[in-house]
Image: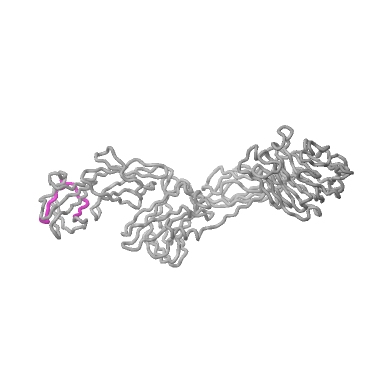
Amino acid sequence: MNTRFKTLFLTLFLGIQLVAFSQCEVLVWNDEFDGSGLPNSANWTFDIGTGSNGWGNSEIQSYTNSTTNVRQSNGVLTIEAIKSGNSWTSARIKTQTKKTFKYGKIVFRAKLPTGVGTWPALWMLGENITSVGWPACGEIDVMEHVGRNQNVIQAALHTPSSFGNTQNKGSVVKNTVSSQFHEYSVSWNADRIVFSLDNVPYYTYNPSVKNSSTWPFDAPQFLIMNIAIGGTFGGSVDPALTNAKMEIDYVRVYEERDSPVIEGPQFVFENQQDITYSAPDYGDGVSYTWTVPSDATIVSGQGTNQIKVRWGATDGTVSLSIAGETGCSSNTASANVATIVELTGRKYELENFSNVALTGWTKNDAGISMQNINNTLKVTYNVNALKYIQYSFPKAIDLSNHGIVKLPIRVPNGTTLPNLLFTLTDGDGNETITTNFEVKVNKNNGEFYTYTYDFSDRWALNSPKVNEKFIKSLRIYMLSGQASFDLDNIILYNSEIIPEAPSGLTAGINENGEITLSWNNGTNASAFNLYRSGNINENFVKIRSNILTSDVPYSINPTASINFYKVSGVNNAGESALSEQVEVIATITDAESDLDTSITIYPNPCNGRCFINTNGLPVSELKILDMRGAAQSFNKQEDGSLLIIDFKASASGVYYLLLKQTNKIYVKRIIVE
């Protein structure tokens, strides 16, 4: 891609894509602390005493199961640490052996104590701690607070890879933690753990490598609430402090479910059968009502979270309404479905310009004109910036297999060569900016030449990725300037099938005295290889690779021997078989006796008139060139197997007679005296 194109494209198409997601919450367990006295024994049990080394942290309190230290009343659970003499008592309650949870959203609504030396915590431990120990069981600290940092809330995780003074932690500042209730929560699934304060995330744990060392969080955990005093994190205790209270309004555990969303193909073929659409399974007591376009049919599954559909012939919407408890704010969903054209076989004619009105064609600048002349698109432009013409297809097409694009382009004789760029765009507006096709038009002799590009395996290189299953339009960009060109039928070819052997291989002569080889370009080959042999139908050796379709007819220099040529087609799938051969007899010698005997010229030297014996075979092409390759004018008469040639050479010297007979090319030297 040339620098001017690249700069302009970066300016036009740089952008940002935003992605969002949401989840629904279904309450699966809670304790609202509506009782009185000790907390509900069906949910909670107690740690008692001072533990080992102050519960492993040099804490100075002793835990009890007394209502002095833990009690519920008026819908609130209170955990209170109390100083008596030089000793502290407190409480630590837990759901171990009662309730455990794996994944979900766990919410504690609490008001925290004040006082330097206090260390309240709302946290979780792996149920398997009794078998694997700590930290192998994993620890999730939903909320930790220390009185010396009154307005700071911390979340932390302890794993075999980082524990104690763990590196896996986050914090947030809130200056009302002890004067108001706040929600401290964790959202935990198989991929990440997100910590929030009042439903605002502030720390996410999501290690790139998840194993037993970094991610012991694929097993159930139980809940813990406590106030510790002093210790390695609580620090020195204010001597004047005599008690500290943490109040918990509720503890709630939610199952996090996906929002109602319809999963299934966005693109379908006309009359396609057995198409599956599904939604999240919200369990018992939930029913699903599906609707599809009028020409589509729900074959099975109505009332459930998954249906089978037989599609019709039009684009449309699949809709869903859910009745029952899902935990979601909305119980409806819809998905737009586009009907696309399924391409089969080796080629697909995308546009043949049979519509005089050029339906579907647009331009984005007044300096561009488009006309349909004899089923060919004629484009003339005079623009001062990068502009384009666009063709929006009647229906989106699936180019998964048909990634080869062939553009036959003709530039009027002797006129300015256009600077063109070709792109494809999917139904979401994503364009092949990175993998664009720079059409290197290099001929302006009034003839059509085919320019080819293979998009196969390149769709994902674009950002955003272009969806090859849903291609909706093409664009041909023109760099600033003025030029004109004609565009013939646009053909898409199958890049996943090995090409057929090229057909119609013939040889010719150009004005420079070169041998030209032509063959049928209308195959699913993106390029061609050329083979040569000195023997008929044997020992062909490749002499050229990846000949562009725009280089056909392909020119080669004459040689001093008989040669046979074949070509093959290549694409992303491989190389075709070789074509039928063409024979080229290109003999340039000094002695008449060395000339091929099937064609004879006499007299040689001559005075401008010579006779050619063709042995009765028809001559399809005849040229006379001087040593510089300039064509000479001559008169020709036929007399049976004889051709009588009269030409008035401008000077005596050596000339070349180029003669094509069936599929043979002869080059003969003529000396004029």
Along the line of sight, the residue nearer the viewer: 572 or 491: 572
Residue 617 % position (x, y): 18, 46
188 horizontally vs 177: left or right: left
Along the line of sight, the residue nearer the viewer: 101 or 272: 101
Please say if 452 is above or below 164. Answer: below
576 horizontally vs 146: left or right: left
181 horizontally vs 395: left or right: right
Where residue 532 sits, quadrant-wise, is top left
Residue 42 % position (x, y): 82, 38
Task: Look at the image and say whether residue 613 sits in the magenta stretch.
Answer: yes
Where residue 81 sits, quadrant-wise, is top right
Residue 130 % position (x, y): 74, 33
- Tell me if I can see residue 431 in this picture: yes
Q: Residue furthest top?
A: 131
Query: Which residues, given as a range, are shown in magenta?
Result: 607-625
608 horizontally vs 132: left or right: left
Task: Look at the image and say whether residue 138 sits in the magenta stretch.
Answer: no
Residue at point 53%, 45% (across, down) = 272
Count of marks, rendered view: 0
- Quadrant, the C terminus: bottom left
